[in-house]
Image (spheres, rainbow, N blue to C red):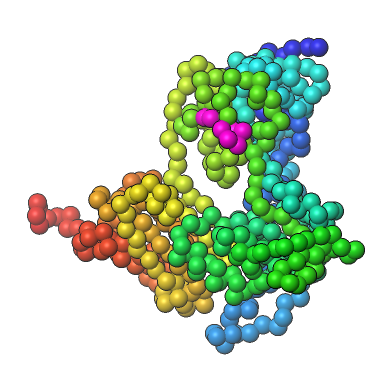
Amino acid sequence: MSTLKTKVAIIGAGSAGMRAYREVTKTTDDVLLIEDGPYGTTCARVGCMPSKLLIAASEAAHAGRHTASMGVTYAEPQIDGAAVMARVRRERDRFVGFVEDTVENWPENHRIRARATFVSDTELALSDGRKVEAEAVIIATGSRPNILPFFQNFGDRLIINDDVFSWDTLPQSVAVFGAGVIGLELGQALHRLGVRVTLFGRDNLIGPLSDPDVLAEANRIFTDEFDFHPHADVVGHRRTENGVAVDLDGEALEFDYALIATGRRPNTDQLGLENTSLELDGRGIPVFDLHTGQCGSAPIFIAGDANNLLPLLHEAADEGAAAGYNAAHWPDIRRFTKSASISVVFSDPQIMMVGDTHHALTERGADFEVGSLDWSDQGRARVMGINKGLLRVYGDRNTGRFLGAEMIGPRAEHLAHLLAWSLQSRLTVEEMLERPFYHPVIEEGLRTALRILNANMQMGAMPPPRCIDCGPGG
């Protein structure tokens, strides 16, 4: 049984592992990238990109359905399910191909196709019988759908988002369990593409939202559009001869498939972490430093979805860079700043969260104020007929600093970036109001919310333009 020696071993070739590899190879070529599955990121293969392809088709199908008030009507769209899914698979494969080509163009002696498990902090056993001894190890093993045993009654009609993107055509009906990001995006998209969809949620939660007012507005919007039960009391479910049945409120609802979208779990449970010196939290995840990626005091680093923190591509890439740098320079490690948190749900209307959530602020007893905007009367949104939703922005009552925001409403993906940049620049709400806002644009709604927030914090009226030629006090 041969033993391979290397400076850095990276377990996993997804977004975090690939970024870690690039960072390591800036310092050394003594690296091994270990992957036991297909190359390709969750984002490209079963996440961000194929879901947005399906959503794009659903938006095209829905485009003319809200324009009657403008005097414009369209014939009922003709949806070719086979053509929709052919494009989803074709473009998905194109994105995945780019990732696969990237990894396969890296030196062959840097890549190992095998499963790795820890024997000790710096020793790995490979499924092909070999061993790896490394000075430092990076865990970048990603995550997988979390399927509760409760759902196994659906048998072979139980599907996850991975399965959706492999369909040859659209089914007639789907029961979706879970109103998080995946369930909400796919459920609404399938509904708009003519699939009969029922979305079953729990505790009136939608996506990552925590602000009670925004949650209430989101519930109103989505329950008005399609069959959505924000707090479903499902008393039974089963596989039937032709599909699945769900017992709700004394009625048996029948569907072709049951799509389980009840979250994801990190792939750390089969790594042999019990053979290391690492301290594990209650979920079995190594306790790690947020700014270095280091697990305890060991030469082990963790990045991406495996750390169960923020399962987002840009976060995985940033964490992979930090882990890669520190593994390559071990034992000389550095702390890296974290970007302002930002998340977007590509539903319609979109959902976004930036910085501290309402829940986080309340939990820590922060002294904060709120500014709100109801999008129903915002000028540009009303002109375009997309005037649904609610924006809530939060500010520190003592310093005037902007703290965060939650929103459901138009163009949320773009407003989220403005707010994240403002947060990372440590701007006060007053300083944000000094920035230019064009007219008439959606962003004017943000300005209104910030003005209300500034007034509620008793920070004074919005300042006038500054005189650059005036002397002190001029």
User: Is 137 drawn above or below residue 407 in the view shown?
Assistant: above
Q: Position of residue 326 (x, y in %)?
A: 52, 24
> Which quadrant of the figure has residue 15?
top right
> Which quadrant of the figure has residue 28?
top right
Q: Is 246 covered by the magenta stretch?
A: no
In the picture provided, is 190 more to the left or to the right than 473? right
Residue at (57, 45) in percent of width and height: 312
- Which residue appears farthest toward the bottom when viewing the image? 71
In the picture provided, is 311 more to the left or to the right than 100? left
- For the C terminus, the image quarter is bottom left
What secondary structure prevails in the magenta region?
loop
Q: Which residues are magenta?
A: 281-288
| Depth order, front residue of 290/383 | 290
| Depth order, front residue of 310/385 | 310
Q: Position of residue 248 (x, y in %)?
A: 72, 68
The answer to whether residue 193 is visible is no
Q: Position of residue 288 (x, y in %)?
A: 52, 30
| Depth order, front residue of 421/449 | 449
- Which residue appears farthest toward the right when viewing the image? 241
User: Is 326 drawn above or below residue 217 in the view shown?
Assistant: above
Residue at (78, 17) in percent of width and height: 130
| Depth order, front residue of 282/465 | 282
